[in-house]
Every structure is written in C-alpha cells, then in structure tokens.
C-alpha cells in the first residue's frame, strides 16, 4: 500500500467515523473481468476472479457478420490480439481462429452465460456496444433480441442481469422488445441534474456516470429521484474509497481482486456484494 493510499484511508476513516457505525452495502464488480489484472473479457479472467471471491462483472457484447454475439470491448481486435479484423466484419469461424496476445480464446456470449448458469447471486452488466454504423435499426433489433434471450435463458433466479449502454437507441430497442429487461444508462459525465433527467426521461432507473466531478449531494439527489447510482472508472483502492464516500450503489473496478482484498481487511463496515 503506498503512502497516498494510507493517508487517503486515514482521512476518509475520520470523515466516516459516524457513518462507519452504519452498515454500508455496495455492489462491487470487475470491469471486463478485472482488465488490469487479467486478460480482459476472457474466460480465464472470469474464472480467476470468481475463484478470488468476485461476484459481479461488466462485459461488452458485439455481433459478428453472421449473427453471433462476441465478448469484446473494441470493434477491432488489434489491441488485444495479433489480428486487426473488426468483430462486425468477421464470421464466428474467423474469430474462433484468433487467440489473444496472452494465448486465450475470444469468448462468445453463449459460453459466458453457460458458465454463469450455475452461479447464484451474481451481478452482471452486459454492455451493448452498438454505436457503430454496422448496427442499423434492423441489425439492432436482431442484436437486442439475441442478447436478451441468450442471457436470460441461463440466468439463475437469484442473479441480477443488466443490459447497459451509452447508445440510447439500443436501450430504447431493448425496452420495446423486452419491457422487463433491467436497464442502465451510461453517461460519460458526472451525476448532476442533467444526467439524472436523461435517465428519468427514458424511464430507466439505473444510471452509470463518472466519479470525477460527482458530489455526494448529487448522488443523494439521484437516489431521492429513485435512481440506482453506479460510478466509474475504478482503477485503484483510492477510487473505491471515494466511491463509497460518495454513496454509490455500485462501483466497477479494473483491479477487482486487489481492491477486494483491501476492503475485506480494512473496511469491515462495507459489505461489497
């Protein structure tokens, strides 16, 4: 633990002395399977973090040229593999022939969902990566319908599955096709009056905004309006401590195992689900 983290913990512990007597619960989840600790969005990442006690995940979903759903944040495979092809322009067979730079298979949604099928009490965010021109209205309908049916087919009764996006078209399409879908609007700005209104105007009760620039008062206002508040990015112990202090309902993390080990030992008043 570095000196800055120690000082941050001491300061926030003093600030939260009274509040610490009250139990805090936060939904804690690994961003892309904890991408700064493991090979992002791969099965080994999900398995390893699960074995370390992580019970929440965020992952990203794209559709291949032949209509299969792939777990990939980027459209291009170039950042994580030797291949520079784009998911939306490749077939499932072509993608299955590619390995990541660390030697892992590219994961398909049905594989991930089958792995999750016997794991009760999970929290999983399926981010709809549909902002590219490849997703016209017709393709978007196919995508949303397949994503919903694949995920929900395997969902344990006690798990929470969310369909999230910064693409309002995808969220509206999912709302129309599957009104029971649990949705979260991602906005790359802090919680404030405008972002609260954007979520409420869409009839969405979950909002994911940036931690930077977000105040405790804004989080409290969002909650008073009936919103579930998720804050990002989370890349350190300091970020987690800040997110808890701000009052977030959910916090994502790129170093989920490291942070979990810290709060399990040093923040006993916080229950991270």
Image: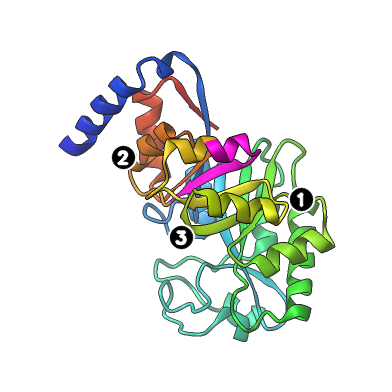
Specify start and end residues of the magenta stretch as a single range. Answer: 221-232
Give the label, 2 or 1, closer to the camera. 2
Question: Which residue is at a point 39% across and 14% down the rendered structure image?
Answer: 18
| Residue 230 magenta-highlighted | yes
Residue 182: give x, y in percent of width and height.
72, 49
Question: Which residue is at a point 42% across and 52% down the rendered structure image?
Answer: 233
Residue tagged 2: 238
Question: Which residue is at a point 53% across and 45% down the rendered structure image?
Answer: 230
Q: Earlier in the sequence, mark 3 or mark 1?
A: 3
Which residue occupies the foreground of this view, 270 or 97?
Answer: 270
Q: Residues within 10 Å of mark 2 (few under 14, many from 20)?
A: some
Residue tagged 1: 154
Please state if 134 lies on the left or on the right of 264 as rendered: right
Circle 2: element type: helix
| Residue 63 magenta-highlighted | no
- The quadrant holding residue 238 is top left
- The count of marks equals 3
Q: Earlier in the sequence, mark 2 or mark 1?
A: 1
Q: Which mark is residue 40?
A: 3
Q: Residues within 10 Å of mark 3 (few under 14, many from 20)?
A: many
> How much space separates mark 2 and mark 3, taking CA atoms?
22 Å
Q: Is residue 228 above or below residue 173?
A: above
């Amino acid at each position: 633990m570095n000196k800055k983290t120690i000082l941050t913990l001491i300061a926030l512990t003093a600030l939260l002395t009274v509040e610490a007597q009250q139990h805090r619960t936060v939904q804690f989840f690994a961003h892309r399977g904890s991408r700064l600790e493991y090979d992002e969005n791969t099965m080994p990442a999900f398995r390893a973090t699960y074995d370390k006690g992580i019970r929440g995940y965020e992952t990203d979903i794209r559709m291949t040229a032949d209509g299969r759903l792939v777990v990939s944040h980027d459209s291009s495979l170039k950042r994580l593999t030797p291949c520079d092809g784009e998911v939306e322009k490749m077939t499932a067979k072509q993608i299955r022939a590619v390995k990541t730079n660390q030697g892992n298979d590219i994961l398909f949604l049905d594989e991930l969902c089958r792995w999750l099928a016997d794991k009760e009490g999970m929290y999983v965010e399926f981010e709809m990566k549909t902002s590219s021109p490849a997703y016209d209205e017709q393709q978007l309908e196919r995508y949303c319908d397949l994503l919903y049916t694949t995920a929900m087919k395997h969902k344990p009764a006690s798990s929470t599955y969310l369909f999230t996006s910064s693409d309002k078209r995808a969220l509206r399409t999912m709302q129309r096709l599957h009104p029971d879908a649990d949705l979260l609007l991602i906005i790359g700005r802090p919680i404030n009056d405008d972002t609260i209104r954007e979520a409420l105007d869409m009839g969405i009760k979950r909002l994911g905004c940036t931690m930077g620039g977000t105040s405790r008062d804004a989080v409290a206002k969002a909650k008073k309006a009936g919103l579930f508040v998720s804050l990002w990015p989370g890349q350190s112990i300091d970020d987690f401590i800040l997110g808890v202090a701000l009052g977030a309902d959910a916090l994502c993390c790129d170093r989920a195992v490291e942070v979990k080990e810290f709060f399990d030992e040093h923040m006993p008043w916080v229950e991270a689900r």
